[in-house]
Image (cartoon, rainbow, N blue to C red):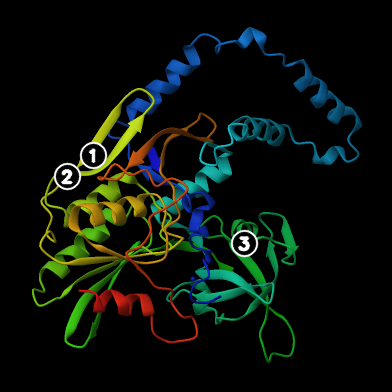
Amino acid sequence: MQFTSNSLKSLIICLLLLSIGSVIGFQVGLRKQANPQASIARLVSLKSAAAPKDYEKVDFGQFWEVWQILENQYLDPKKLDTKKQVYGAIQGMTSSLEDPYTIYLPPTDQKRSSEDLAGAFGGVGIELGFRESTLAVISPIAGNAAEKAGIKAGDFILNIKDTKKDLDIDTNGLSLQEAVNHIRGEIGTEVTLQLAREGGEKPFDVTLKREEIVVPSVTLTYTEKDGKKAALVKLSRFGGRTDQEWGKIVSEIASQPSLTGVILDLRNNPGGYLDGAIDVGSEFIKDGKVVTQEGRYKNQEYPVNRQGKLVNVPVNVLVNKGSASASEIVAGALRDRRKAKLIGENTFGKGTVQDALELDNGAGLHVTVGRWLLPSGEWIHEKGIKPDIEVVDDEKTPDDEVVIKALESF
């Protein structure tokens, strides 16, 4: 596989269901491998290959010297974990490249990354964030365990207990990702949260059974004003379920000829499968190029891959600093090929492509193998895409000023 990698309203919330996951998914996006055997064959080739170039010049003596010193002298020997030490050494090797997208993921992190992109995993249905520097429920997700148990938006989470994980930890000092890791888990297992509610007399415990959480990647609503009506399509990521969800929404939009246009909301979309970006772009672009990938050994153009149902429908695109990778591909392609207006804030700026390999022990290795260019030839890495119309949503108002501007701009 290859990767191209809401404060209550605009805070980038770490979804318990989503970890929005993806610690990695925020900045990277994936492309499904056309031939899954290719990565397998490559791994076999690597294992049987000769020693790396200049291997004989590498002195591993100091590595083992440090290992031995830690083994014999470190104050708390219970913290010496051989697996973690090996994982850490490999992570150090990838980080030496000073490329934030070339990374080694230990098995647990690799599993979570895959779950996030698949859009389904074991959780309790809570959007998680911080209030007054304390871990808190931003919102319970309708129909899931947390809502059914009476957990409310604004509840503070003081402690997390999980007998199976041998975990009993106060949340003071925990990062969002650490909290996500503790609360998510195997479907059918239980986690107990100690909560405090404003106006409540004292903290109370709620035990929740984890269930499969399915997070839709595409949602459709409609917005209208001054005689204009547009389909507002919120695309939160390009994941494993996006293609199927997208197809249903496009069919509904295509069946409504009276629409002024489509507003494609890519704000806080961290990316996902590159194939998904091409699919979405192809729905609006009649023919020709969507994106070009420049590699170490060869370049490849990715053209429109379907007969789009929305090629004649006006489209405006919403972006912000959380729009990255595959979402930038779509935004840029629609700007270059459809003259779509980009409305909002400057995008994140990720213009590289990663090859995603799964190793024998379930770990993952993501390696930067190329850069992608917009149809205009522009490489947006580390600078992002500047919107045609700059608008920032005012959190103090009930309306979304960016959506309003997009509708006015048709």
Q: Residue at x 61, y 35 (%)?
A: 95
Residue 302 numbered mark, or none: 1
Element carrying mark 1: strand
Query: Which of 205/302 is in front?
Result: 302
Screen quadrant of the C terminus: bottom left
Say which residue label 2 marks: 305
Q: Secondary structure at mark 3?
A: helix
Label number found at residue 343: none
Residue 134 sits in quarter: bottom right
Mark closer to the observer (2, 3): 2
Assign the N terminus to one quadrant of the image.
top left
**Disc with the residue nearer the chain's start (1 vs 3):** 3
Q: Could you tell which of marks 2 and 3 lies nearer the N-terminus?
A: 3
Residues under labels 2 and 1: Cα distance?
8 Å
Q: CA distance from mark 2 to mark 3?
A: 39 Å
Assess whether mark 1 and mark 2 are in contact (beta carbons under 8 angstroms): yes
Q: Amino acid at mark 2?
A: Asn
Q: Observer-nearest residue: 340 or 78?
A: 340
Residue 280 shows in the view: no
Classify mark 3: residues with Cα within 10 Å, few (<14), some (14-19) or many (20+). some
